[in-house]
Amino acid sequence: MIAHVRGEIVEKFAGSIIVDVAGIGYEVAVPAIDYEQLTLHDDTKLYTYHHVREQSEELFGFSTLAAKKLFELLITVQGIGPKAALAILSLGSAEQVRNAIANSDIAYVTGASGVGKKSAERVIVDLAEKVGLPTEYGSGIAVSVTAQTDEALEALMALGYTLADATKALESIDTSLPTAARITEALKQ
């Protein structure tokens, strides 16, 4: 399993990039939000999901571990394959997608290319409780209380916590503490 790739972005095309890792180019499909932020010749680290099929192997990459974990949850839903999951994650940040699912926003999920109403309903029914977190509403957009790029959250998820459990463990811990201290406090609970 290829868990992540780190290297220079040498090419960008049609929603994919090629990352040069020690002379080997890995083609990685990325969500639209990551594709727009990645720049040619920059060094980057992407968390990857290695999808193996009978006829091919594909890498799907994400700038955050939270996005990768949400992708892995999406592909557990019947009828949602890796490309549909990537299309759903291309609608916005991982937090925006998570909030749309948690708040049963079928219209938002059906905005993904190749995802119909029945598939969107199945995503919401299967995942709403798994991704549900406290939210605040402002300007009509659900925003998570937890920061989108929270390293403590990502570390807990790497230890096997679900997104919901990791967020719950961190919600009462002071965000001004160093990441290591926040992780330690969360593990004590």
Image: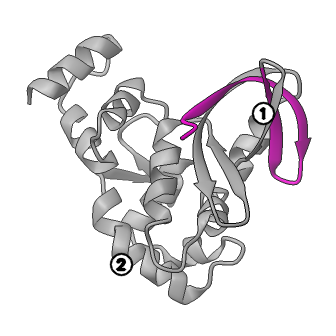
Q: Is residue 171 magenta?
A: no
Which residue is under mark 1? 38
Q: Dot 2: what SS?
A: helix
Figure quadrant of residue 42? top right
Q: How many marks?
A: 2
Q: CA distance from mark 2 to mark 1?
A: 33 Å
Residue 34 locus on image (x, y percent): 70, 41
135, 37: nearer the viewer? 37
Which residue is under mark 2? 125
In the image, farthest residue toward the front: 54
118 left or right, relative to 88: left
Q: Which residues are magenta?
A: 1-21
Q: Dot 1: what SS?
A: loop
- Visible residue check, residue 61: yes
In the image, farthest residue toward the left: 189
Q: Please say if 21 is above or below 177.
A: below
